[in-house]
Image (cartoon, grey):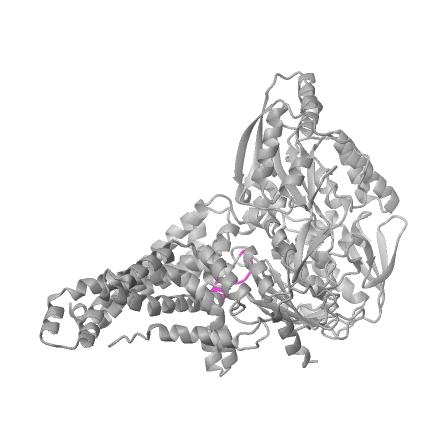
């Protein structure tokens, strides 16, 4: 196991190197540059040229890349052109917000999706099964953006139950040692802040979690149906094991394997959904930041931010692989 | 991992039940705290280093200049200077300073502090000489640098020459040439006077250029310690979440009505409106045209309007034949139905432009040549020019952009193209994304015969409108008209207000008679507040003229404005906070 993990971690180096080259080329292949976006109506050719010289964008691309790489190995991801803040500092501030949101969305998707799929499979062809199908289809097909507006209208504007923007009420004073606001509230024993931060997560988590919820429910259902017809399940039932125990030990546990895979993949994909969710809920996370940076052609942010996201994606996948071993001893052995 | 237990719906039900019980109203209802929704965070809180509206808005609450603008107008009034005189040659401006003023850090405001600021700007190192870095010092004030780089403005082209602290409360600014715009320029937050001690202590100019040439402030002045003299002081800034200002109890002028102003960045328009409806914010800027009717129909909300400070126009590139012919340009001017466009696409907040600046700006001439909508006349003019109809032209418009003066460029374009086609032209549509290359193309003169573009002014002066567009030949317009250029040069240096006004009026007449281009709209921008919020005065110059010091929330008892539909949320929060006083 340790060797497996070590090998996978070593693989990170070529993967990230490759990603950084692709990113570098892709970003510079986008038409235009940061100058025009900084200057607006004032973008005369001379002004654009001056800015490109200042930012070193007039140098050959390989020179730019080597310079970039030199700094990268020291952990310096450069400085945002738009905000003039170091990219690493911005990531440090924004990443917890995104992780918190993604975790909340996944919790929502799993807590609701797995039982829904399980029950649907057990009541195969019944009302619950059909209802879960319809729910899943709705979950997958409603654009996050629209769902978010709808949720906000209902639960915030009309009912006044939940907040619509931000991570924390502006009038609550709270310390943020970790950057994860719910956790921060708990560790600083500021339960009001933790509660408030949780409330701020509910609507974004539902909006972002709707698609994974649908997918998790469908995969769970399919997996359970599959496993249910396996010989060992039949055997277990035949030898008189209680139906609850069969479900839990034999069916559920084996059915979880594909579900964990999909959860891992979905967690990585959540970032693209987070772009919209963070924007609509005014959450200062990675998604909205990267989206704005594309518009601004903020090269250092795009390079550093996306590279970091790639790193996270690879690590999440590694964790998924490791969890296979935990769920299924056969994989661990081989 | 063992066993996964599945707490079915119970958990979710419990959560929602708790939410329903616990969550009365939303935040921000504290009557002494105003929460205001903005589109983004400021870039930095050092006036010298910014040119974006979000930074300007925040700085304008904290810092002050020698002059200021009368709220709601573009008229210059005394601020940190009580009065001023000019030498006969117009090269020396002597300001008498207010004497009872201290910076937020307790340091005294005096002539020395004024000179310190001007010398700081003039002595900026290479890293701070970029156009995008110190835009307003260079192009608002006309300042240059003592030690310029090959790209930047040197001392000989700098309007600023030197600063003399005559005595504690008298300061003289020496200029290299007469300037009529200096009093307006001094109102800009980038030219505001801040505490020398704070600039030094928190290393405003430390840091410097990294390898990419980007200046990263090494000090904390621009992020944690902006220190001015204004009615609000900086308290804290959590990027992406909130920027908090508190009332300056030692303010020399009228005290702020609000104890705290909190700016919350909310990039999404729909999210800003919803946050206002829930009470999470009490006001926001940049109301979208499609949201106007929602706000007007909501008894808890009010809509405010900023006088227009922009102009939308169709560039005519004279360098592309047949646009060099006056008749052809006149034909374009007659072909476009401006009333129709302004009435259809601006949600009731546009006025038809007669010339290249709005009437609020000194130098506006009411009697310029106008071009009424007349397709038949346009055709006739084209024939007079000796052209065979239809005349083929390229017409460019930008995509992926919404500007105050053109909320939806494509719609403007389509209406204009139809007009032009009906008047003897044959329009070929061309387009490019605003960012990155549309504007550069228009400015470089490599777009079409006609291009849709416009201008949002930096400060309230004719020089920042027609002076910027036409003072010298540019590739955007592709013409040389010494008469117009000379008039504008003369006007820029004329320090006698009346004479200057006449020069600009004359220039406006010449420009329109020359049919240089087709200005068609000045659009106002709307803001929205909850209806109990009073005292916000929209400024024609926008965020750089709008103080939150006069803003307050009406008391529940005095709620004369209560509309009856007021829902319980706001009242609840108001009573909650009364104990705090």
**Relative to B56, is B487 on the left or the right?**
right
In the depicted structure, whether residue B508 falls above or below residue B57: above
Magenta-tinted stretch: A81-91
Asked whether A83 falls inside the magenta stretch, the response is: yes
Place of residue A280 in the rendered image (x, y in percent of width and height, measured from the top left): 50, 59
**Relative to B53, is A264 on the left or the right?**
left
In the depicted structure, whether residue B59 falls above or below residue B445: below
Place of residue A283 in the rendered image (x, y in percent of width and height, measured from the top left): 50, 64
Place of residue B412 in the rendered image (x, y in percent of width and height, measured from the top left): 60, 37
Q: Quadrant of residue B555?
A: bottom right
Q: How many numbered marks appear?
A: 0
Residue appearing at x 63%, y 52% in the figure: B292
Q: Residue furthest bottom?
A: A189
Quarter of the N terminus of chain B within the rendering: bottom left
Residue appearing at x 25%, y 65% in the figure: A7
Place of residue B122 in the rendered image (x, y in percent of width and height, measured from the top left): 71, 56
Comparing B533 with B540, the one in front is B533
Q: Quadrant of residue B578?
A: bottom right
Quarter of the C terminus of chain B within the rendering: bottom right
Comparing B107 with A56, the one in front is B107
In the depicted structure, whether residue B527 falls above or below residue A50: below
Asked whether B137 falls inside the magenta stretch, the response is: no
Comparing B437 with A120, the one in front is A120
Q: Does the rendering let one see residue B89? A: yes
Q: Does the rendering let one see residue A262? A: no
């Amino acid at each position: 196991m340790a060797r497996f993990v070590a090998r996978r971690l070593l693989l990170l180096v070529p993967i990230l190197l490759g990603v950084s080259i692709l990113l570098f080329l892709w970003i510079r292949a986008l038409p235009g540059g940061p100058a025009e976006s900084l200057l607006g109506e004032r973008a005369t050719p001379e002004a654009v040229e001056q800015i490109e010289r200042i930012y070193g964008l007039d140098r050959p691309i390989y020179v730019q890349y080597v310079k970039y790489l030199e700094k990268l190995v020291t952990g310096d991801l450069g400085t945002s052109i738009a905000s003039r803040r170091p990219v690493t500092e911005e990531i440090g501030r924004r990443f917890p917000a995104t992780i918190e949101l993604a975790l909340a969305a996944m919790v929502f998707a799993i807590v609701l999706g797995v039982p829904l799929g399980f029950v649907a499979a057990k009541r195969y062809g019944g009302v619950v099964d059909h209802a879960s199908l319809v729910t899943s289809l709705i979950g997958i097909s409603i654009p996050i953006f629209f769902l978010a507006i709808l949720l906000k209208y209902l639960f915030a504007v009309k009912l006044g139950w939940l907040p619509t923007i931000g991570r924390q009420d502006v009038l609550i004073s709270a310390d943020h040692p970790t950057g994860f606001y719910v956790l921060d509230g708990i560790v600083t024993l500021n339960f009001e802040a933790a509660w408030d931060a949780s409330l701020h997560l509910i609507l974004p988590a539902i909006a972002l979690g709707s698609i994974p919820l649908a997918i998790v429910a469908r995969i769970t259902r399919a997996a359970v149906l599959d496993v249910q017809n396996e010989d060992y399940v039949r055997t277990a039932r035949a030898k008189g094991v209680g139906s609850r125990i069969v479900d839990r030990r034999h069916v559920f546990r084996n059915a979880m394997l594909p579900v964990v895979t999909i959860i891992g993949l979905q967690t990585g994909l959540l970032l693209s959904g987070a772009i919209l969710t963070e924007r609509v809920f005014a959450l200062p996370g990675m998604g909205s930041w990267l989206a704005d940076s594309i518009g601004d052609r903020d090269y250092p942010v795009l390079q550093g931010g996306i590279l970091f996201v790639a790193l996270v994606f690879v690590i999440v996948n590694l964790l998924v692989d490791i969890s296979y071993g935990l769920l299924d001893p056969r994989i661990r052995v081989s | 991992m063992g066993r996964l237990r599945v707490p079915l719906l119970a958990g979710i039900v419990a959560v929602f039940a708790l939410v329903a019980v616990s969550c009365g109203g939303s935040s921000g209802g504290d009557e002494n705290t105003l929460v205001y929704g903005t589109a983004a965070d400021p870039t930095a809180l050092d006036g010298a280093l910014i040119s974006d509206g979000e930074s300007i808005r925040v700085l304008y609450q904290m810092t002050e200049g020698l002059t200021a603008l009368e709220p709601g107008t573009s008229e210059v009034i005394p601020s940190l200077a009580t009065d001023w005189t000019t030498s006969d040659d117009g090269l020396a401006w002597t300001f008498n300073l207010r004497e009872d003023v201290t910076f937020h850090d307790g340091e005294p405001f005096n002539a020395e502090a004024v000179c310190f600021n001007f010398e700081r700007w003039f002595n900026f190192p290479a890293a701070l000489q970029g156009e995008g870095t110190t835009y307003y010092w260079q192009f608002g004030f006309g300042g240059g640098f003592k030690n310029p780089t090959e790209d930047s403005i040197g001392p000989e082209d700098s309007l600023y020459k030197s600063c003399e602290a005559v005595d504690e409360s008298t300061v003289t600014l020496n200029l290299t040439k007469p300037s009529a715009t200096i009093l307006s320029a001094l109102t800009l937050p980038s030219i505001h006077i801040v505490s020398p001690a704070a600039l030094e202590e928190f290393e405003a100019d430390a840091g410097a250029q990294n390898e990419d040439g980007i200046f990263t402030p090494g000090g904390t002045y621009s992020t944690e310690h902006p220190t001015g003299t204004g009615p609000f002081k900086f308290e804290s800034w959590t990027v992406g979440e909130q920027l908090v200002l508190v009332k300056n109890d030692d303010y020399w002028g009228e005290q702020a009505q609000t104890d705290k102003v909190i700016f919350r960045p909310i990039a999404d328009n729909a999210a800003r409106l919803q946050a206002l409806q829930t009470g999470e914010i009490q006001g926001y800027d940049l109301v979208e045209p499609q949201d106007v009717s929602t706000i007007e129909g909501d008894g808890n909300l009010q809509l405010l309007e900023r006088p227009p400070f922009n102009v939308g126009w169709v560039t005519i590139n004279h360098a592309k034949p047949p646009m060099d012919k006056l008749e052809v340009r006149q034909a374009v001017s007659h072909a476009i139905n401006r009333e129709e466009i302004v009435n259809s696409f601006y949600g009731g907040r546009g006025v038809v432009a007669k010339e290249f600046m709005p009437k609020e700006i000194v130098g506006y001439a009411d009697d310029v040549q106008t071009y009424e909508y007349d397709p038949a006349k346009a055709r006739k003019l084209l024939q007079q020019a000796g052209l065979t109809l239809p005349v083929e032209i390229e017409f460019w418009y930008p995509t992926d952009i919404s500007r105050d003066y053109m909320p939806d460029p494509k719609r403007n374009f389509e209406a204009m193209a139809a007009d032009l086609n009906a008047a003897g032209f044959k329009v070929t549509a061309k387009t490019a994304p605003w960012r990155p290359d549309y504007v550069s193309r228009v400015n470089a003169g490599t777009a079409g015969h006609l291009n849709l573009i416009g201008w949002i002014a930096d400060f309230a002066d004719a020089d920042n409108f027609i002076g910027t567009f036409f003072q010298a030949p540019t590739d955007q317009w592709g013409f040389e008209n010494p008469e117009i250029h000379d008039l504008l040069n003369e006007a820029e240096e004329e320090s006698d207000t009346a004479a200057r006004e006449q020069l600009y009026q004359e220039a406006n007449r010449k420009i329109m008679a020359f049919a240089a281009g087709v200005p068609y709209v000045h659009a106002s921008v709307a803001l929205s507040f909850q209806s109990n919020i009073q005292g916000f005065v929209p400024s024609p110059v926008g965020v750089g003229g709008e103080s939150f010091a006069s803003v307050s929330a009406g008391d529940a008892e005095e709620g004369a404005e209560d509309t009856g539909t007021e829902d319980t949320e706001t009242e609840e929060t108001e009573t909650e906070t009364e104990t705090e006083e």
